[in-house]
Amino acid sequence: MKTILITGASGFVGSAIIRHIGNHPGWNVIGTSRRSHDYTDIVADLTDKGAVAALSRACSPDVIVHTAAMAKTDICEKNREECHNANVSSTKNLIEAFPESKFIFFSTYAVYNTEEGNCDESCSTNPTNYYIETKIEAENYVRGRAGHIIFRPSVIFGYTPFTRATQNYFMQLLDMVQSKKVMRSPADQYFNPVLVNVVADIVMRSIEENISGTYNIGSTENISKYDFNRMIMERFHFEMRYLRPIESKNLAVSRPDNGTVSSSAIQHILSYRIPPLAEMVHFLYEEMSASTNLRVS
């Protein structure tokens, strides 16, 4: 039986990985986060070396999946020391405290930040804000660990009854619709959104296959943010009058118009098929329809 330590257990991605792996026999999953949570087995501040040392005495994981991070770019810019501690120091502390554990690090597709689009893992990185700088610095440190995996996921969406709406693309959209707020979405910005359940499955399969290296994770379809939001709203029977297309030049925050990535490498090495977007959205709809916590239509 493999023991897996998941950091960021109270977060959107970490809790999803815990739920997914925990549903399969033969896995001992331990969740850790800074605060008590349904999926937190051990409360620990990963920026504190002493706390991480205590964590290493409490468990001996075969694999660490490090999802915990400080990700809001504006907050990262204003609180650089806190951001560095959360994204870099925590990573170093874990690697030093668990020298024998396979290390899986969650980075971001934003490290490319180029207008070229369809970036594969060989594309150069281009940090344009402090958050991305810390992710690249942490990546470079992780590469010193033999057998490591670095994931660079695109925008991850999905349902979670536990975390705040702003931590999840879909839940933020849902919150706006339920609040009857208009969502203005760029029709000229393209990306590869991916369902959190798919990300969790890829993590589990990567551990099973004992792969290593750096991999993008995203849908195989390039889609505009407006068209993706429209796809969701149509499937969920939301009122379309709350969705309006805009041009990216009218956004308050500048982002590349073509933020697409290629996920061919992870599909090839795992012999894995990332489902079409429509299939992922349908799965999300079915998952939410089965939930008693939220009305979806």
Image (tube, rainbow, N blue to C red):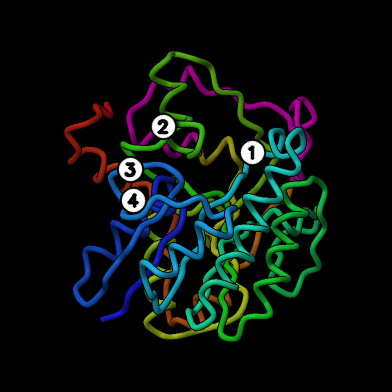
Q: Position of residue 53 (x, y in %)?
A: 50, 65
Q: Is residue 102 visible?
A: yes
The secondary structure type at the circle numbered 3 is loop
Q: Position of residue 107 (x, y in %)?
A: 62, 60
Residue type (three-letter) at the residue carrying disc 1: Lys
The relative height of residue 198 versus residue 288 in the rendered view (above or below) is below
Q: Nearer the viewer, residue 107 or 58?
A: 58
- Image quadrant where one finds the C terminus: top left
Q: Residue at x 79, y 63 (%)?
A: 125
For residue 40, which numbered disc appears in the image?
4
Q: Which residues are magenta?
A: 229-257
The secondary structure type at the circle numbered 2 is helix
Q: CA distance from mark 2 to mark 3?
A: 30 Å
The secondary structure type at the circle numbered 1 is loop
Q: Earlier in the sequence, mark 4 or mark 1?
A: 4
For residue 233, which numbered disc appears in the image?
2
For residue 37, which numbered disc appears in the image?
3
Q: Are marks 2 and 4 in contact (CB under 8 Å)?
A: no
Instruction: Look at discs 4 and 1 and give the one toward the viewer.
Output: 4
Q: Residue at x 56, y 61 (%)?
A: 106
Instruction: Look at discs 2 and 3 and give the one toward the viewer.
Output: 3
Q: Are marks 1 and 3 in contact (CB under 8 Å)?
A: no
Q: Are marks 3 and 4 in contact (CB under 8 Å)?
A: yes
- Image quadrant where one finds the N terminus: bottom left
Q: Which residue is mark 1?
A: 72
Q: Earlier in the sequence, mark 2 or mark 3?
A: 3
